[in-house]
Amino acid sequence: MRRGERSAVYWTLTTCVLVAAAAVGGGAWTAAHSAPPARTVVPTATATVQSTTLSSTTQLSGTLGHGASRTLFSPAGGTVTGVPAVGSTVADGGALLSVDGLPVVLVDGAVPAWRDLAVGSAPGADVAQLEQYLVSAGFAAGLDLTVDQDYTWATATAVARWQRAVGLPATGVAARSELVFAPAPVRVVAVAAPLGSRISDGQPALEVGSTAAEVTADVPAAQTYLVHAGDRVTVTLPSGQTVPGSVTGVSTVAEAAGSGGGGGGGQQGGPVTVPATVVLDDPAAAAGLDQAPVTVQVTDRTVHDVLAVPITALVALAGGGYGVYVVDRGGRRLVAVTPGLFSGTLVQVGSGSLRAGDRVVIPSS
């Protein structure tokens, strides 16, 4: 074979090898890039169909405080020599303040002190209030004291014992300057007459409020049917702690946010709400909190003795509606269900083919 012929054969063979290699390489690329994607397998587990009670709830915004404050007036005049700390509690029989070194004592009662009380005073409800305190505090022990509206010698003796115990002159006469009749106990909100100041009879001494923690919940006006006096609720504090409580009252007056006084042409009106009052079962849980934002959870619907499954067990059916996969000895079967009430992670389901205790498929993660 001549040299030119050998070159032609060489290039012909080389070309064939390259074409074959290209064909093989192209086939490999096509196979690699045209393979169907791998199926994603979702890990599953099973859950038990429950027969249970479910409730749905509504969340309301609220504020935790101690109710409206009121003013207590000093019945004595002079120099203020003692005041309680703001936030402290003054109990029935405790000192509200001291004037010229003598205590002014809080006594539980609805009728204000308006006169000195002594043997011979005209009968009255103020006498009965004082006698009730003297008996309950133990100052009438061994005395023939009847709680009525008559100030007797037994009453005077008990008053002298009380005066001696609290540091007042033991006269047996309950002077108006010595006590304040008001609902007790009270929580001190503000001091109107600071230590060392001069105060006159009838001048404001303290701003006080209830000792009981109280929540004001804002109920949307269109949802007042959800809340009634006596309803049980759950209050979530700023710390995340939940405390049970009861609704004590629902106002009949609606309020619009931002509709209060003040001019300026700003935006008027807002969500219209009705305030509801809630007291906590455990007031100590709210210790140290005042005007704190809270959430009130109200139960708006409850269903009893229903079948329930985890919400994640629901499967959307191709023809519409929902079903669940029930696992039994034969494998698993799809059962159509009708969802009902949703509550937390569970949903009520209705189906003639489902029973309490059945196992249904749910995602495991």
Image: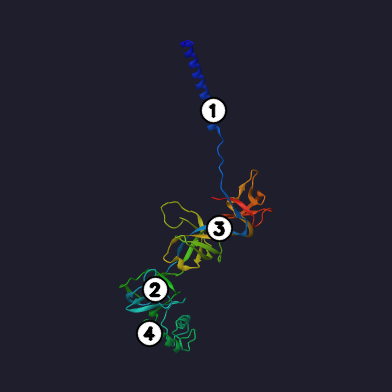
Q: Residue 111 appears at what percent x and percent y?
A: 46, 77
First in sequence: mark 3 vs mark 4: 3
* Vertical relation: 55 (above or below) 197: above
Check contact, mark 3 vs mark 1: CB within 8 A. no
Q: Residue 26 appears at what percent x and percent y?
A: 52, 27
Q: Residue 115 appears at what percent x and percent y?
A: 41, 81
Q: Is residue 44 visible?
A: yes
Check contact, mark 2 vs mark 3: CB within 8 A. no
Amino acid at pointer 4? Arg
Q: Which mark is residue 164?
A: 4
Disc 1 and disc 2: Cα gap in Å?
100 Å
**Mark 2 — residue?**
73
* Vertical relation: 9 (above or below) 311: above
Tell how many labels.
Answer: 4
Q: Is residue 341 visible?
A: no
Disc 3 and disc 1: Cα gap in Å?
62 Å
Disc 2 and disc 3: Cα gap in Å?
45 Å
Disc 3, SS: strand
First in sequence: mark 1 vs mark 2: 1
Left or right, 169 with respect to 249, comes to left
Amino acid at pointer 1? Gly
**Within 10 angstroms of label 3, few (less than 14), some, or many (20 or more) residues?**
some
First in sequence: mark 1 vs mark 4: 1
**Mark 1 — residue?**
27
Q: Foreground: 96 or 344?
A: 344
Q: Residue 174 appears at what percent x and percent y?
A: 40, 83
* Vertical relation: 214 (above or below) 46: below
**Mark 3 — residue?**
57
First in sequence: mark 3 vs mark 1: 1
Check contact, mark 4 vs mark 2: CB within 8 A. no
Disc 3 and disc 4: Cα gap in Å?
57 Å
Disc 2, SS: strand
